[in-house]
Image (cartoon, helix red, strand yellow):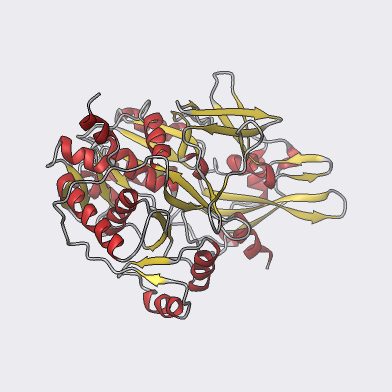
Amino acid sequence: MTDNSMQTETLSPIHQAAQRSSAAVAYRFMGQSVSYSALSQGVIALAEQLSAMGLKRGDRLACIAHNSPQLLQLYWACVDSGIIFCPVSPRFATQQVIELMQTHSYHHYWLAADNPADSTLIQALNHQNQFEAVTLDFTRQSQQPAPALEPHTAVNAILTSGSSGTPKAAAHSLANHIASAAGSSELIKLTKDDSWLLSLPLFHIGGLAILNRCALAGACVVFEDKSLSLAEQLIRDRVSHLSLVSAQLQQLLNADGENEGQSDCLSQVKAMLLGGGAISADLLAELAKHKIKAFTSYGMTEMGSQITTGIARTDGSSGKLLSGRELKIIDGEIWVKGECLFLGYLTADGFNLPLDKDGWFYTKDLGHFDENGNLCIDGRADNMFISGGENIQPEEIETALKLHPLISDAIVFPVADAKFGNLPAAILKLVSGTSNDQEQLPSEAELTEFLAIKIARFKRPRSYYPWPEVSSAGIKVIRKQVIAAVKR
């Protein structure tokens, strides 16, 4: 191996892609394409600006923004600089942003200019003298050579869902992301001619994983265009890969059916990574007609996204273990480790990586392997409760409820009872287009009959509530927040 080839291997994936094919499209935004060459030069210029402002390797930069080309560029500039890219949802309340920055020692911040709450947030941040704003010119280009980097140092910190208390910030290295993308590509092939729709936020590991997968393959990232329907954008931007939940998939298939005789919006789609649990037989049959491969997976922030992946099935299983990962189940509880395992949660002066003596990370997820070796997720260890001496796992009941054609989401929780200790109750979200109020919910008698052959009688909810109006700063529903709103 020559010295030159060794140096090439230490370059960021976007610079390597620019060297291989400078004119290849790195991303599309509002119908406009930007090449890997332009992205590479812009990222180098951004890294130069960050350095000129005094930011150095290991510093933490809070990036408060929705998905945008600027946020993509800033991530790769942080990779080049050794600065830790710390995306924060702009939907967080101002006080919560400040508390997060204080807790995780985010002393520098970049705030997107289009943030509707920017004036309030800027004013609040200006009153905190420990924070310094970063101003950047994203139009600059640099002809300097791309810098070599250390792939095992931290490049980002993703906030966990924070279902209780302040969200933790999980740090990853570029090596973690490369291992994650390599495992993903075993089943979901991605080439330089492909494009992946960035339908997940970059403050979520699923969104960041799309950036890394595309860069390593030399593929194109497609930003969502809210002025178009999803079906229209798939056609215009020739999207080949996308990440969806079942409800979005159903809307796509409906749109495709309504446009009979027009261009098939799914004609160029090669693969879908589906979330949200079991996929109905009808949806899978429709995908088969279009010859689209659909996959489901089990993943988590701390493991850089996917851990297991498999062909989507009606039983809700999550496929088999991908390379670079290890997984074991002890007393129904899932433990993981491997090349994707994060560096640890950010602390004031470093990282905290909570592992057992053999290097395993406890996920708090419950699961088992089926007879075909596919992982099946049974719920969360910290959600279980006891009713009349029986263990109740809310996720089992929720999965059954979501098979009802009118129910898009469900949360099951315990309600105190003098005789049984606790009884299960359920909060139901109805499918889009249905008024989500008590009168529109299916009756208890109807749901009891519906669940009769799906779960044991003692597990069926004794009361049902409509989904409350609860704001969310991320893409995950925060269970405790929804339950608390119902209990008020």
- Please name whichever residue, 355 or 278, is drawn nearer the observer in this view of the structure: 355
- Image height of 90 relative to 213, above or below: below
Q: Is residue 8 visible?
A: yes
> In the picture provided, is 364 more to the left or to the right than 83?
right
Front residue of 442 and 286: 286
Q: Is residue 407 left or right of residue 200?
A: right
Q: Residue furthest right?
A: 419
Q: Residue 435 placed where, x, y %?
A: 50, 61
Q: Which quadrant does the C terminus fall into?
A: bottom right
| Residue 470 appears left or right of 74 | right
Q: Quadrant of residue 356?
A: top right
Residue at x-position 40% and y-position 66%: 108
In percent of width and height, residue 365 lies at 62, 39
Which residue is at 27% across, 56% downward? 47
Q: Position of residue 205 (x, y in %)?
A: 44, 47
The quarter of the image holding the N terminus is top left
User: Residue 264, can we see it?
Assistant: no
Report the front residue among 412 and 328. 328
Residue 125 falls in which quadrant of the image? bottom left
- Residue sitting at 17 percent across and 44 percent down? 25
